[in-house]
Image (cartoon, rainbow, N blue to C red):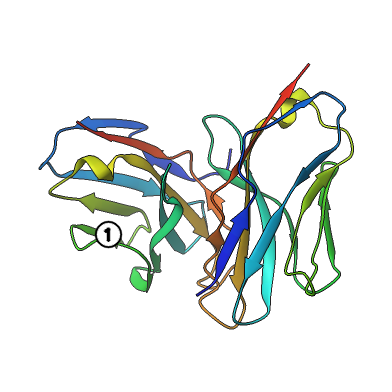
Amino acid sequence: GDSVTQMEGPVTLSEEAFLTINCTYTATGYPSLFWYVQYPGEGLQLLLKATKADDKGSNKGFEATYRKETTSFHLEKGSVQVSDSAVYFCALSESGGSYIPTFGRGTSLIVHP
Amino acid sequence: DSGVTQTPKHLITATGQRVTLRCSPRSGDLSVYWYQQSLDQGLQFLIQYYNGEERAKGNILERFSAQQFPDLHSELNLSSLELGDSALYFCASSVGPRDEKLFFGSGTQLSVL
């Protein structure tokens, strides 16, 4: 079945550092890929998405590129802020299937001033 | 604020008991999803309803059941509770039955003692 694997956290960075959170996936078809973010005490919210190979999703300074050849969708940000501290979830959705997103286990990001 | 409302925010109960979690979707959304988030399993899809009908089932135990009412709110019933049922239960909603973008509530934290 479909699955998403994320790097384990927590990831601890200083403010203005470069961020990478790795995500790889296994899918039977041609999925859409997502990053969701969960701030403390809140539900998940969609951060960015990409629907086909080589697409780049971007939002709030975060970027991720759909790499079909490596089945990856790594999240990057050039300069993190304390307010980026949250849990980040990579997810996929099969357009030919149920559309229901399958999530990774989440990666906690802690940014220190 | 995602527009999805979950009540209660916290629930503490004992093994063997039965609880009901409630979810009101965003205005205009017809589809409701339930997810369970635990440290060992990550974010697991339980069940989806669309316009009052069950549409998809995931890793939902037989002790658990759900329904969506005519006013589109949904309830998740958990019975014969076990210690391992302690988790954060999320409700999410979307407009249609096959939307890739979900809007999440802030969750109900269930503690089974």
Q: Residues within 10 Å of mark 1 (few under 14, many from 20)?
A: some
In the structure shown, which secondary structural element does the residue marked by tag 1 occupy?
Answer: strand
Q: Which residue is mark 1?
A: B66
Tell me which residue sits at (86%, 70%) in the image: A54
Tell me which residue sits at (28%, 52%) in the image: B76
Where residue B113 sits: x, y (%)? 19, 31
Between B36 and B94, the one nearer to me in the picture: B36
- A39 above or below A96? above
In this rendering, position of residue B44 left or right of residue A52:
left
In this rendering, position of residue A42 left or right of residue B112:
right
In this rendering, position of residue A94 left or right of residue A47:
left
Q: Chain of mark 1?
A: B
User: Which quadrant of the figure contains the C terminus of chain A?
Assistant: top right
Between A28 and A51, the one nearer to me in the picture: A28
Where residue A103 sits: x, y (%)? 55, 57
Q: Amino acid at mark 1?
A: Ala
In this rendering, position of residue B57 left or right of residue B63:
right
Where residue A110 sits: x, y (%)? 68, 28
- B64 above or below B5? below
- A46 above or below A28? above
Is residue B100 visible to us here? no
